[in-house]
Amino acid sequence: MKLQDKKILLTGATGATGGIGKEVALALANQGAKLVLVARRLAQLEDMRASLPNSECHHVLALDLTQPHDLESLSEHCRACIDDQCIDIVINNAGYNQFDLLSRRSAQSVSQEVQLNLTVPILLTQSALQWINRPGLILNVGSTLAGIGYPGYSAYCAAKSGLYRFSEALNRELDGSGIKVLYLAPRTTDTSLNSEYVRLMNQQLGNHCDDASLVAQHFVQVLQKEVEVRWIGWPEKLFVRINQLLPNVVSNTIRKQQETIHHFIRSMHKNV
Ligand SMILES: NC(=O)c1ccc[n+]([C@@H]2O[C@H](COP(=O)([O-])OP(=O)(O)OC[C@H]3O[C@@H](n4cnc5c(N)ncnc54)[C@H](OP(=O)(O)O)[C@@H]3O)[C@@H](O)[C@H]2O)c1
């Protein structure tokens, strides 16, 4: 889809350092898109909007998407066709995770993580079916961890892999309707989502870490070419395949990393 003059709803549009949404907003604005930017903090959203090219063409909405009332307000805004133009593309990018052992986490934090990463995009997508333009695109942002169950991220892996299957199923359900549902899975990206412990652990394990601006270029390509599924980065996309076919091979590799993973989880708790 050409992005020039398209109205795009982007959730999770800010970020303290980096922030995938922040870079995506800039990349889309550079393509001439008109944006509706959503996150919880209004001041950051306003700064973000002011920094974009053609800032007067973009809107901001400060909403907590885990609150049913806020999610309903967002749907109402979109149904009302902001500035008389309905939404052409929805990007479900808002997400969160907490690196820790499941046994050490509160039930509430697990539940919120699943809600923001899985339930919210499903419900916003369901609502979008009533108001999105046709042709229209819905892009769900996943993670490499949707394809590889990884220690310290069990609830996040569950939510992002659920989002992957949801996107696949709905895309097939909507075949021929004019709406496509796409799934883009970044690997580790340098944003404030990852704590200092996670950064150090990734460094020690030799895991790649992408710049958010590079990830944003993938968003643009996936939307322009309407790519149904994209896993970003080698060798991660290969591991995702191997994990499907030969999960024991991946389990053996991760077993060798266990000591390092547990070391960082222990250090994290010592310093709380
Ligand atoms: N960074 C990575 O390593 C990585 C890797 C793979 C996939 N991803 C995925 O990429 C997406 C973006 O991640 P990121 O790294 O850019 O994270 P980030 O820097 O922490 O940004 C998260 C964004 O979501 C917003 N947000 C959080 N909770 C929200 C809520 N309840 N309601 C509305 N907005 C909310 C935040 O703004 P407010 O705090 O103002 O609400 C912020 O704009 C997520 O889906 C994440 O799972 C990230």
Image: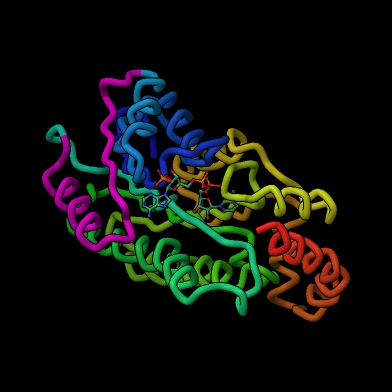
Viewer-side residue, 35 vs 114: 114
Tell which residue pokes out farthest to the right in this image. 256
Please name whichever residue, 24 or 228, is drawn nearer the observer in this view of the structure.
24
Q: In the displayed structure, does residue 28 sit left or right of residue 36?
A: right
Q: Position of residue 251 (x, y in %)?
A: 79, 77
Could you tell me residue 231's position as x and y percent? 62, 55
Q: Is residue 128 highlighted in magenta?
A: no
Q: Nearer the viewer, residue 14 or 138?
A: 14
Residue, x 64% and y 67% (percent of image)? 100
Q: In the image, is 161 to the left or to the right of 49?
A: right
Q: How is the image coloured?
A: rainbow
The percent coordinates of residue 253 (x first, y second) are 85, 70
The front one of 93 and 47 is 47
Q: Which residues are magenta?
A: 54-82
- Left or right: where 30 falls relative to 37: right
Please tell me which residue is depicted at 67% across the width and 69% down the height of the picture. Answer: 152
- Based on the picture, tell me whether residue 71 belongs to the magenta stretch: yes
In the displayed structure, 57 sits above or below 164; it is above
Q: Residue at x 39, y 40 (%)?
A: 1
The residue depicted at 28 percent of the width and 35 percent of the height is 60
Measuring from the top left, give residue 78's x and y in whole percent.
19, 47
All told, the count of numbered labels is 0
- Quarter of the image with the C terminus is bottom right
